[in-house]
């Protein structure tokens, strides 16, 4: 399966296409920013912890989505193969050039 996936990925990456599939950005989960720890402890005290800093969804319930959006970020996802029916936009071929040159 890895070899098949690699072949499809390479075909799509090179702009050759593969019927029914496209390359899209992978989904990523939000993560706390560097300043979130202190702010959450200030606002929530011990309730900020459950053996680790509470999850983003739990914090939204406690302090609201607006403040959590200031304290969290969603890292950019990698590029993966997805069916044509996937709602994410297709990655344009020239984006791969930027990825390989480090620009």
Image (spheres, rainbow, N blue to C red):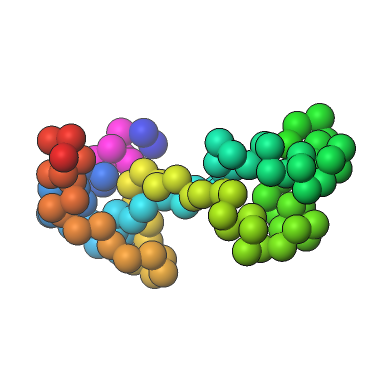
Q: Is the magenta stretch mostly helix, strand or loop?
A: helix
> Which residue is located at x 32 percent, y 65 percent?
89
Picture layout, residue 3 above or below residue 92: above
Q: Is residue 23 above or below residue 101?
A: below
Residue 71 image point, x, y percent = 59, 49
The residue located at (45%, 45%) in the rendering is: 75
In this view, 17 is above or below 31: below
Q: Which of the 4 image quadrants contains residue 97? A: top left
Q: Which residue is drawn at 33% across and 47% down?
A: 79
Picture quadrant where residue 101 is located: top left
The residue nearer to you, when weighing 94 against 81, is 94
- Position of 91 with respect to 81 (left or right) is left
- The answer to whether residue 96 is above or below residue 67 is above
Taking depth in this image into account, of 85 and 36 the one nearest to the observer is 36
* Residue 42 covered by magenta stretch: no
Give the residue furthest to the right. 46
Image-based side of 42 in relation to 17, left or right: right
- Report the residue at 51% width, 49% height from top: 73
Q: What stretch is highlighted in magenta?
A: 3-7
Q: For the view shown, which residue lies furthest in the front direction?
A: 42
Quadrant in the picture for residue 20: bottom left
> Could you tell me which quadrant the N terminus lies in?
top left
Would you say 21 lies left or right of 96 here?
right
Q: Can residue 93 be seen in this view?
A: yes
Which of 89 and 37 lies nearest the eye of the viewer? 37
Coordinates of residue 36 in the picture (x, y in percent): 63, 42
């Amino acid at each position: 399966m890895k070899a098949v996936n690699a072949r499809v990925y390479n075909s799509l990456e090179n702009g050759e296409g593969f019927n029914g599939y496209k390359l899209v950005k992978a989904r990523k989960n939000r993560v706390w920013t560097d300043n979130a720890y202190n702010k959450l402890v200030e606002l929530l005290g011990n309730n900020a912890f459950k053996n680790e800093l509470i999850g983003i969804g739990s914090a939204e319930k406690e302090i609201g989505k607006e403040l959590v959006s200031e304290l969290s970020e969603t890292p950019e996802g990698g590029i993966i193969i997805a069916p044509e029916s996937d709602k994410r936009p297709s990655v344009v071929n020239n984006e791969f050039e930027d990825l390989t040159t480090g620009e």
